[in-house]
Image (cartoon, rainbow, N blue to C red):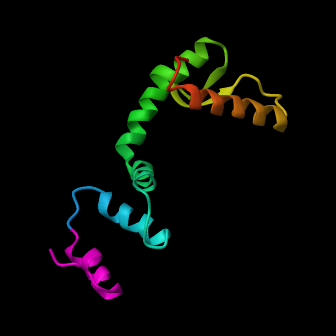
């Protein structure tokens, strides 16, 4: 396959020759361009995920049917609703200071780091 050599070749590829069945190619090129021409596989994967509406929809369903349900049942959060549709969640503990929020966030980070070695 022919390799683009300069800006005009790359521009021609993106504009005229790139065949797309999904958003993958332009997202990868964009992240490379934004990072000086190179990026890790993880950076590219995260960029792809952030642009993949089907994954957003998948995790929206998981949020409502699993995570949100468990946290609601444990009295930690309350669903925010528009009619009968859940549009978000609110912490039940509303009077946290910035320091308390930071401390609790750090505890969550710690649990995330340990999640590969022990069940939550």
- Nearest the camera: 97 or 83? 97
| 69 to the left or right of 4 | right
- Nearest the camera: 38 or 92? 38
Image quarter in which the C terminus is found: top right
Does the magenta run of residues contain 22? Answer: no
Furthest residue in direction front, as rendered: 117
| 58 to the left or right of 96 | left
Give the x, y percent position of residue 31.
44, 64
Give the x, y percent position of residue 48.
39, 53
The prevailing secondary structure element of the residues shown in magenta is helix
The stretch in magenta equals 1-18
Give the x, y percent position of residue 101.
77, 34
Dividing the picture into quadrants, the one containing residue 110 is top right
- Nearest the camera: 83 or 52? 52
In percent of the image, x 23 and y 62: which residue is there?
20
- Indicate whether 112 appears above or below 50: above
Give the x, y percent position of residue 7.
35, 85
Furthest residue in direction left, as rendered: 1
Does the magenta run of residues contain 16? Answer: yes
Image quarter in which the N terminus is found: bottom left
In percent of the image, x 41 and y 48: which residue is there?
49
Dividing the picture into quadrants, the one containing residue 25 is bottom left
In percent of the image, x 31 and y 87: which residue is there?
8
| 46 to the left or right of 70 | left
- Indicate whether 71 appears above or below 24: above
Furthest residue in direction top, as rendered: 73
């Amino acid at each position: 396959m022919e390799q683009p050599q300069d800006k005009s070749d790359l521009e021609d590829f993106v504009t005229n020759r790139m065949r797309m069945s999904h958003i993958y190619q332009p997202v990868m090129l964009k992240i490379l361009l934004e990072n000086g021409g190179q990026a890790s596989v993880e950076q590219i994967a995260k960029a792809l995920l952030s642009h993949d509406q089907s994954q957003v929809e998948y995790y929206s369903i998981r949020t409502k049917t699993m995570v949100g349900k468990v946290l609601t049942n444990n009295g930690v959060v309350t669903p925010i609703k528009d009619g009968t549709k859940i549009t978000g969640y609110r912490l039940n503990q509303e009077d946290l200071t910035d320091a308390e929020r930071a401390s609790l966030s750090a505890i969550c980070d710690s649990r995330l780091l340990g999640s590969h070695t022990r069940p939550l």
